[in-house]
Structure formats: structure tokens, C-alpha cells
Amino acid sequence: MQKTGRSFLNNVTGWILPVLILIAWEAASRIGLISPNVLAAPSAVAEAFWRLLLSGELLQNIWISTLRALSGFAIGGAIGLVLGLANGLSSLSRNLTDTTLQMVRNIPHLALIPLVILWFGIDEEAKLFLVALGVFFPVYVNTLLGIQSVDPQLVEMGRVYGMSRSALFFRVILPGALPSIFVGLRYALGIMWLTLIVAETIAASSGLGYMAMQAREFLLLDVVVLSILIYALLGKLADSLARLLERQFLQWHPAFQPA
Amino acid sequence: MTVISFTQPAERARYQEGAGAQAVPDSKPKVPRETAPAARAATEPAAKTALSLRGVSRRFGEKEVLKGIDLDIPEGQFVAIIGKSGCGKSTLLRLIAGLDDPSSGKLTLGTDGHAHRTRIMFQEPRLLPWARVADNVAVGLTGLSKGAEARETALSLLAEVGLKDRADEWPAVLSGGQRQRVALARALAAKPYLLALDEPLGALDALTRIEMQALLERIWRQEGFTAVLVTHDVAEALALADRVIVIDKGAVSLDLAIALPRPRRHGSADVAALEGRILAALFDEQDA
């Protein structure tokens, strides 16, 4: 009982500051400290939210953006995971591909936008490609690192106890690499939203980023701020989801055990 | 580590046994049988040989870590291998446990298909942090049993080492001694024919170590497996072993049968005398 009370309190603590900022922001707008041409008041943003929600425009755009983000994430993450595992387990695979991947990694993926627009236009493929590319590297690098940092003593133990190759992988190597894989996953989620926002503001005809750009054209500052807030919320949601998974899969880890 | 200091140089000199490690006549009645390494310890004719080494050498590059070791270990014997750091004792144990192959010579394990039932207990517990205690013990049953049956066996093994009520905990919450007990349960799961112990108690505090020695002895007497223990603790070797082998510079420098009755008491006069003899063999080179 006391424990749940404390965790509730901890959850609430994190929200005190955002709420205070919101109140101060609203107050500053009301007394004219912040001009509506510079930043829309929270109440105006809430109004825009309600308006767009009723018209269905908002949900439509959120849905499109989320779909793009998740499919790009799935594609890039899956390739990153598979290559990370392959290169962690096989030195042949690593020797063959790692140098190339490390070279590509050092190119900021957003620098490819002009090229991507030439290749794919402003269709879905362009966004998918960029998100997948952005997500790929943190997942790849951290999966590889995770596999390489699995305690060799545990692997030796597994061998001594007669584990087959698949048992060794599923019972020793993969669980050992999992904390690092999760670090990559959470990092990738951040990059996923970042990439999507940039891609949608530059080359899109739908989605949250497009909505924000359109609003800018018509000087609808409330909608611009709304889009930014929604990005923040979606980002937080994705991170919370990753944390939830982490807590589920890394129960054994001292860092995730109730103190 | 238990450090025994010599206060009587004369006593120590008395035990200095040249290259032949010839037994020094001793007036005490309880003097154990002692043989030169070339002749190997005389084994009971009835006991089968669990492990036999013939001219076993191991080289790492230029360095010859083990130089033609000849050794016979009868079934059910508890052998302690003692030596200074870098003398090759851990290498020898890795060969015995099948983790490594000799560069030359022959190592015969058991008489028939017992090879897979060699188990090793490491200095570190090496438990899977992501598996519950019972599941860690069940790792020892890999290829033997699964599911509910494995869990049942694991639970009874945990009861054996006094940890039944911790079966569903994560290894991270156990103490060092408890983790090593889980590792022992895991090693025993397959009813090993030969159990190789690589300083398994080396990282534990002195009191826990004595408790663990008693546990190890009890289980060994109950199960009757052949045990090879590598240690740097002479007192531990004397508390547990039927036979102490001192390795120096990759060769057997002393092969001593310990005929003390069990359970042995720490700090008895017989133990002290044997301890002096073994330490003399260990520090022989430096004194000469």
C-alpha cells in the first residue's frame, strides 16, 4: 500500500513542472506579456485542439504520422537487430559488413533528404526510408555491442553444461544482450520522431509535420504549437512503452528491481 | 586465504624433500602414506580409475605450463591440487574438466561413457542473472530433463544446499555464499561422475567458506562422485581431500595421502603437521 502510494507520488512529481510552466505561460499570454503573434496561449492551443479534433483532421494526421513512424521503425529496427545479431555472432559477417556500416553511419541520415526526394518524390517511401535508416543504426550498434559484451564466462558455463547452439543463444546470449538492445531501442524511438518531423515538414502532403507547415503558411500559430505539443506527447508515449517493455523483460536486472 | 607462518625454521628444514620428494621418516603415529610422484599414489586395487593422465603436457606458445603429468585418480576419491599462482594447477583442472585439450600426452576419463557427466564449478558462481534460482539449477539438467520434472529435481537439489525457499528469486538478491551454493546444486544436478572444482570457495569470506566446506564434504560423501579441487588454501585442502597434490612449475612435486578421519576438525595437531609439510613443499624452491 505504502509502495503504491510512493510510486504514485513519484509519477505526480514529474508532472508538477510542466503544469507550472503551462500556468505561467497562460498567465503571461493573458496579461499581454507574450504576443499571440509569437506564441499562442495554452487556451488557444486547446481550442485549436478541439476544433481539429471535431473536424477529424487531427486524428487523421496523427494516425498517418504514427503509422509512418511505426512502419519505418519496424523495418529499420528489424534490419538493425538482425544485422547486429549476425555480426555479433559471426566474425565472418562482421568482417564483411561492419566497416561499410560504420562508414554509412557517419553520414547524417537527414543529409540524404534531397537525394531521397529525387528518388522517391514526397511519397510514403521517402519517409519510410528516412525513418528506417535513422532507426537502423542505434539498434544495430547497440545490438552488436550487447552481444559482444555478454559475459564469456557465462557462455563457457553454457557450453560446459551441454547447451546446444540455439539454447546458448536463447538462454545466455540474447538475454545478456537485451539491456543493451533496449538502450538502442529507446534511442531509436527518439530518432524515429525526429526524422519523421523533419521529413514531414520538408516533403509531405499529410501528417502532423505537414499540418504544422500548413498552419505556418496561414499564420495559425495555435495549430503550430499544438503540433509541437503532440509530438512531445507521442514521443513520451513511445518512451513509456519502451520502459514498460524494459521493466517486463529486464525484471532480473538489479536496476529494475523494487528497492 | 589462510596464511600459516613458519616459526620454526628447523622444523621446516626437516620437511625439505629434494627433487624426489622422498618421504621423511616421522615419529608420529598417524603419518599418512606418502609416495614419490614417479611411482604415483598407490591406489586401492579394487577401486576403478576415474581419471588417468599419462605424460600430459600443455603449452601456450613457447611456455610449457604443464610438463608431462602422470596421475591416476581412483573413483570416489577427493583430490586437492595445490600450487602457487601460475604453477599450472588451473590449466590442469581445465584439462581434467575437458575445457581444454593437452598439447601432448593422454588423458583418459572414466572407464566408459561417463565423459558427459564431468561437471565443473568455477571460482565465480556464473549463474544466469536473468533466470530464477530454480531455473539456474535446471541448467545443470540440460539434455536430461525438462519442465516440471526438471523443476522438481532442481527444488530437491536446492533443498539439499539449504536454499529451497529462495527457488523463485533472482540470483542478484542472493549473497556470495548462497550463489555459490546454487552453483553447487547446478553442478550436482546431473549426478556427476567427476566434479572439478576451480577454487569455488576462493571468493567467500572465511566463515562462509568453512560452512561451504562442510556442505561440500557432506554431499560428496553422500553422492560418492570423484572430486578434483584446485585451491590455494592448504587448510581447505586438508579439510576436504583424501589426497593432496602439490604442483610446482608444471610438475607434481608432492603427492600426499591424507588419512585423517572425517569430519575433520580445523586446527587439530595432525592437520597442522600436514599443513607444515605441504607448505614446505610449496616453498621448497625459494628456500633452496
Image (cartoon, grey):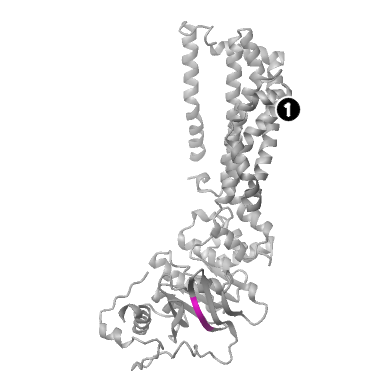
Q: Nearer the viewer, residue A30 or B95?
A: B95
Is residue A250 visible in this depiction of the protein? no
Q: Is residue B235 above or below residue B32?
A: above
Neighbours of disc 1 within 10 Å: few (<14), some (14-19), many (20+): some
> Which residue in the protein does label 1 denote?
A125
| Residue A210 image position (x, y, % from top left) | 66, 17
Q: Is residue B96 left or right of residue B252?
A: right
| Residue B98 image position (x, y, % from top left) | 59, 71
**Residue under the image location 58 percent in, 76 percent down:** B194
- Quarter of image, res B12: bottom left
Task: Name the chief secondary structure element in magenta.
Answer: strand
**Residue under the image location 64 percent in, 19 percent down:** A201
| Residue B259 image position (x, y, % from top left) | 44, 87
Over which residues does the magenta segment extend? B66-71
**Residue B69 highlighted magenta (yes or no):** yes
- Looking at the rendered structure, the secondary structure element under dot 1 is helix
Is residue A258 visible in this depiction of the protein? yes
Q: Nearer the viewer, residue B288 or B283?
A: B288
| Residue A80 image position (x, y, % from top left) | 65, 41
Q: Is residue B205 left or right of residue A169?
A: left
Q: Nearer the viewer, residue B88 or B127?
A: B88
Q: Is residue A150 above or below residue B77?
A: above
- Quarter of image, res B140: bottom right
Quadrant location of the N terminus of chain B? bottom left
Q: Is residue B186 left or right of residue A119?
A: left
| Chain of residue at mark 1 | A
Q: Amino acid at mark 1?
A: Glu
**Residue B29 highlighted magenta (yes or no):** no
